[in-house]
Image (tube, grey):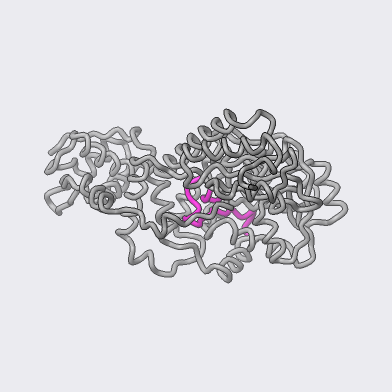
Amino acid sequence: MKDWHPDLSRSSSPRYMAIADLIEMDLRSGHLAVGDRLPPQRDLAKRLNVDFTTVARGYVEAQKRGLVESHVGRGTFVTGRAGKARQDFAPDAVPDPRRASIVDFSMNMPPEPDDPELIAGMREGMSAVAASLVPLLRYQGFGGSGMDKDAAAAWLGRRGLTPSQERIFVTPGAHPALLAIFGLLAKPGETVLSEIITYPGMRSIAAQLRLNLAGLPMDEDGVLPEALASACERLKPKALYLNPTLQNPMTLTISTGRREEIAAVARKYQLPIVEDDAYGFIPQQGPAPLAAMAPDLTWHIGGLAKCLGAGLRLAYVVAPDSKAVWPFVSAMRANNVMASPLTMALATRWIEDGTADAILRFVRTEAAARQQMVAAILPAGSYRADPISFNIWLPLANGWTRSTFGSHMRSSGIGVVGSDAFTVEGAAPEAVRVCLGGPITRERLHGALEFMAHALEGPPEMASSFF
């Protein structure tokens, strides 16, 4: 029998997952070899000071990965299939060019992972989920299974949120959740508030539901509390929509003090807050969510599109109280039935095994590197951005308009969207959102930014694309 004593601190996963992770790590390092008999489950539980069931689940997980085999009366033996599992999944698997070329440059996208080890880990998660493929093709209850909600709670806990499980729902993306929530909070013709320059999806949702969307003025710290209070008095709004961290498109983050002021005004007028926290996980130490300051007033939406991948189409929603749960469930079921169990299982797997954290670290690092590139190419003060945002907000000068600039940049490989898409009230400013993420490489981005900087030095008539 192998005298195996794993150090659980080597893995950030839940303890049962860490046991399977460490079997795999030690098999690759040579500390474990094919044929080694692992310690009996009760003995290992005693050594690690954990419950017997934790070790039992760990061995089951390792068996699912093909790392071990258990035989009644004989014990659990290492099979040595860790390398094979990765090899079987990766070498012959190449991206289908018909899918690889699909991209919508109008969307604000995080940088895409290009690290082979990270991509291999992501693929291993897909392979592990595939072991449960048949049950994952079934209809399931809305809102996610217990294990999916546990993963959601663990993920939301990174933002300091600790709601009860019955208030957490896994939804098929932030957009359908917003549509359902605003359908509950306001009737056609009623008013909801947002930033005066806001997420285009919110404008579309308000139009779809025939709501009056009123924009609030902002400064460097976010919407102005006095303007919010005045709007509450004049317009009697039914809700306030905010994208408070790395706001799309302005990239500003509402400060802690301003969040407290906004929460105080909302509490005075009993105004529900809809917190679209799409980028909340990107800063390592961002301000606490509004849902932590006014949990009884706030619908919190923690989308995974900007930190893990938009193709997952998942968001974790926290309802403000138990009374709001059933109307929300009914609305979501009517519109969407359920989130895809396949994508839920993949997200849960990535959260449990640490892949989600690895993706998030990549996104932060790469976004910072791209912002540094922007700072080296564009004049200081000519644009607004955050050191880890995926985009910049670019006011235009020298006679450039948002339409001529968008046309000029169309072939550059980066997404440029005019301010019309984001403006709630009044004339749209001559400005554009420039996305730095998506499939574009650093090298191509560098060239596109230099192309952009050259064009901005003079009027549009001087740009070669207008010959």
List x then y, in percent, for residue 128. Answer: 31, 53
Residue 312 drawn in magenta: yes
Q: Nearer the viewer, residue 221 or 400?
A: 400
Residue at 35%, 37% in the rendered image: 11
Q: How many labels were placed on the picture? A: 0
Q: Quadrant of the N terminus?
A: top left
Q: Residue at 59% of width from left, 30% of height from top?
A: 375
Image side of residue 292 versus residue 80, left or right: right
Residue lying farthest right? 234
Residue in the image at 22% along x and 34% along y: 29
Residue furthest out toward the bottom: 334
User: Taking 294 as reference, is 370 above or below it?
Assistant: above
User: In the image, residue 129 lies at what x, y percent?
Assistant: 34, 56
Q: Is residue 356 visible?
A: yes
Residue 78 magenta-drawn? no
Image coordinates of residue 178 in percent, x first then y, are 63, 58
The part of the chain drawn in magenta is 303-323
Residue found 24% across the figure and 41% down from its top: 23
- Left/right placement of residue 186 relative to residue 165 reads right
Q: Which quadrant of the structure image shows residue 259?
A: top right
Q: Is residue 138 left or right of residue 154?
A: left
